[in-house]
Image (cartoon, helix red, strand yellow):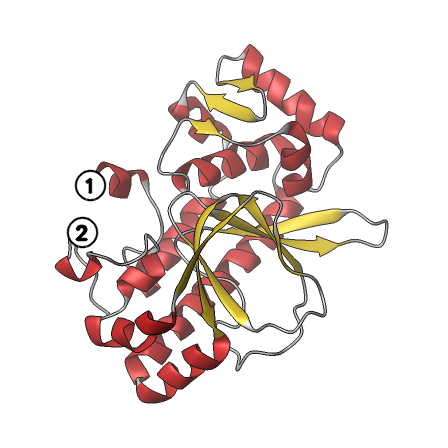
Amino acid sequence: MAARRRNDPNDIGRPFNNLLRRLSAGDFALIAPHLAHEEAKASDLLYDPGDDVEIVHFPCGPSLVSYMVSSEDGRDVETILVGREGAVGGIVSQGYLPAYTRIIVKFGGPFVRLHVGKLNAAKTKSATLRNVFARYADCMLAQIFQSTACNAIHSIEQRTAKWIIAAMERTNGEDVVPLTHEQLATMLGVGRSYASRVIHTFKAERVLETRRGSILVLNREALRIRACLCDECVKNHFEKVLQGVYPTEEAHRG
């Protein structure tokens, strides 16, 4: 499928969600009347395991959502992040199926909501709309596969750098990331002391600083050198399957 150009006139008036902006004008018109805009706060719960999935949530702008899987000792471990490149809840299924993971808002901000019944009705009218969401499902699955491999083979330092970079790319390229030590530990699936130790190392190397409830990146290139290449693999797959949808620094500058 051809890439959507930046500054495409079809983007005017659309929510700041790259997946929605990827749709053709005709496909977007099928769902536009049913989109509801809302603001969500950090830690807002979208779904608990077992909940009926009735709403598709599209993060917009700097909003970020996290898929959390509960472990047998009661801890929640993050699997993937979803920002303005995608959506959560009933994307490919016919909806109303039980949610498997806990889905929470990591970074608050604007969202767009769409009832799965309206999305499914639109899919029956447009093969191209079905195709876009099927392609996105493939990209999300690739992200899950890569996250599984990353957790198994890469160090806490590499994963920490990767997560911070991923958060930066999804928050309009800002150097300040609203991330606490506790949140970072949950994202990595480690104890808070491990996450704090890595942060202190990065601070000593002048890679970043910490502020109340956030992290300030001082040296992006140094952070990238310390990160694994898992996010790059995911980006490359997105570019092949849904070109122009995954947030990048180049897109911010454009």
Q: Label 2, label 1: how many angstroms apart (C-alpha)?
A: 7 Å
Image coordinates of residue 217 in percent, x first then y, are 45, 22
Residue linked to disc 2: 6
Q: With respect to residue 53, does 58 lie above or below?
A: above
Instruction: Give the image quarter of residue 85.
Output: bottom left
Among all residues in the image, which is located at the extreme right?
73
- What quarter of the picture does the C terminus occupy? top left
Please name the amino acid that badge 2 sits on: Arg
Image coordinates of residue 104 in percent, x first then y, are 61, 52
Mark drawn on residue 38: none
Q: With respect to residue 101, does 96 lie above or below?
A: below
Image coordinates of residue 140 in percent, x first then y, are 48, 62
Q: Secondary structure at mark 2?
A: loop
Q: Is residue 130 left or right of residue 12?
A: right
Mark 2: few, some, or many residues within 10 Å (few <14, many ≥20)?
few
Q: Is residue 225 left or right of residue 191?
A: left
Residue at position x 41%, y 26% in the image: 175
Image coordinates of residue 64 in percent, x first then y, are 49, 47
Residue linked to disc 1: 254
- What quarter of the picture does the N terminus occupy? bottom left
Please name the amino acid that badge 1 sits on: Gly
Q: Is residue 40 left or right of residue 156?
A: left
Do callouts 2 and 1 mark residues in contact (Cβ within 8 Å)? yes
Q: Secondary structure at mark 1?
A: loop
